[in-house]
Amino acid sequence: MNCVFPTNVTTAPGWILIGSASCTVAGIAPNLTLIPLDLNITIPAGQTYAFALGGFSVAYTTGTTGCPTMASDGNILIKEGFGGTLTSTIGNRRFNGRVTYDYGDPNAALVWSPATGLSGTTIVNPKSSPPLAGPITYTVTVTGTAGAQTHLQ
């Protein structure tokens, strides 16, 4: 893949503002700052999308030419890209942060067990406050609308 970096994301063709958020910077890694955006974007199979993050303290390091893959799994590839500001770019940069995403059936039902110490048993990311007696292994059962189940520990 040959990377093409826009010189100005705010005016470049094909770049659309899809969200913005205010947040308080938590510092540098490992104290990552959560950027509270729920973008609800569907990326069709085989398509390439790019996202630009702007603002103060967006951390990048020097990357490699050609936009190599920096992280991947069976569903998504995260590639190096560009850094700088929204109006002045620097090519070959690696984003120093964490990307989270979800996929699959948006109507899937979740059930966590045991309920001990959990803030909820039917939500995606419950907070855990287990008793001090020892570790607890939690299991989540995900049931899709077609009835298929997946169990994870």
Image (cartoon, grey):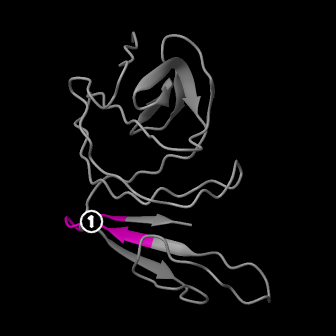
**Where residue 151 sits: x, y (%)?**
46, 66
Task: Give the position of the C terminus as an image quadrant.
Answer: bottom right
Query: Which segment is the magenta one?
Result: 141-149
In this picture, is 11 found above or below 30?
above
**Where residue 47 sits: x, y (%)?**
26, 28
Per the image, the residue denoted by label 1 is 144
> What is the secondary structure assignment of the residue under circle 1?
loop
Which residue: 33% across, 28% down? 9
Question: Outermost residue toward the right?
Answer: 133
Question: Outermost residue toward the front?
Answer: 87
Side of 47 where 29 appears, left or right: right
The quarter of the displayed image where residue 13 is located = top left
Nearer to us in this view, 37 or 149: 37
In this picture, is 142 found above or below 67?
below
Q: How many marks?
A: 1
Which residue: 45% across, 83% down? 121
Task: Give the position of the N terminus as an image quadrant.
Answer: top left
Which residue: 35% across, 19% down? 6
Q: Is residue 146 magenta?
A: yes
Q: Label 1: how many residues lie within 10 Å, few (<14), some (14-19) or many (20+)? A: some
**Where residue 14 sits: x, y (%)?**
21, 27
Which residue: 26% across, 23% down? 12
**Where residue 127 sits: x, y (%)?**
56, 78
Side of 13 where 102 appears, left or right: right
Q: Please name the amino acid that badge 1 sits on.
A: Gly
